[in-house]
Amino acid sequence: MGPGRERKRLIAASALVIVLFVFDIFSGGQVRAQARDSVSSVWKLGVSAGKAVRGSGFFSSRAALEKENAALKDQLARSQVRAAAYQALKDENAALRGMLRISENELGITAPVVSSFRASPYGTFLVGAGSSDAVTPGSLVLTEENFVIGRVADVSPHSALVNELFAPNVSTDALIRGAGVSVDGQGGGNARANVPREVQVEIGDPVTSPVLKGRTIGVVGAVEEDPASAYKRVYIRLPVNLAALQFVYLLKQ
């Protein structure tokens, strides 16, 4: 765009301003009044729009949002607690039903586990039944799956101390595929034994104990063979999580 055209536009704009100024003088200020009315209308429109937006709640205050967020978190926490309580009750009922099945064939008593398996380094735990419930030292302790996990070592009126069968340095005579072995406890529901190489042992094979009336004490979890050895190493485990046990069944002698 050339300088000449720019000059013409500037002159035209200046002339328009002069004309409006002169007209405003002769009209008694009507031009200014009209301009003020227009600006006032625009301002009122903006204020009304702002009130409408605020009234709609579109921009909630930060405090209100934080309060709502806290309420939702509290509701979620309560729901999680209820779900956990329901699951705990469901697990407890399942365990008690398992004990009921054992009691149909075995004389004994269901007792709660009152101390953690992890709390004692000696492979012992406490149950909530004692001499007042006819529990005696030597009583076998079973899981709901009918696995022997220990023997009662000491008894008080309302509790009993149980020695775990697979506690460290505890040996138990057992049978694996008909072969007699000595099972050595390793703690944590694990044990191991040496089995003659010619015996066909597979993962999942039951391990029973003749000294415990032929009851099952574990299952084969792994087999390790050494061609230079006459024996294979068999790792035995309990197919239950001892740390999660809530109840056990104590056989009466």
Image (cartoon, helix red, strand yellow):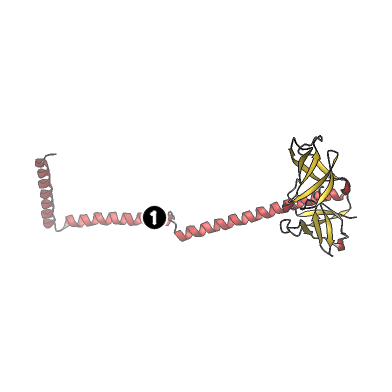
Q: As drawn, is 189 to the left or to the right of 29?
A: right
Residue 232: where, in percent of width, then height? 77, 39
For disc 1, the marked residue is 52
Residue 149: where, in percent of width, then height? 80, 51
Q: Quadrant of residue 230?
A: top right
Residue 241: where, in percent of width, then height? 73, 49
Q: State the residue lying farthest toward the bottom.
A: 157
The residue under label 1 is which amino acid type?
A: Ala
Q: Nearer the viewer, residue 144 or 53?
A: 144
x 51%, y 60%: residue: 67
Q: Quadrant of residue 73?
A: bottom right
x 29%, y 56%: residue: 43
Q: State the residue lying farthest toward the front.
A: 228
Q: As drawn, is 35 to the left or to the right of 109?
A: left
Q: Which corner quadrant holds the C terminus?
A: bottom right
Residue 91: where, in percent of width, then height? 73, 51
Q: As drawn, is 16 to the left or to the right of 56?
A: left
x 83%, y 59%: residue: 153
x 88%, y 50%: residue: 106
Q: Nearer the viewer, residue 27 or 106?
A: 106
Bin the neighbour count of mark 1 within 10 Å (Cα to Cα): few under 14, some 14-19, many 20 and up.
few
Look at the numbered disc 1 and give the secondary structure of its residue. helix
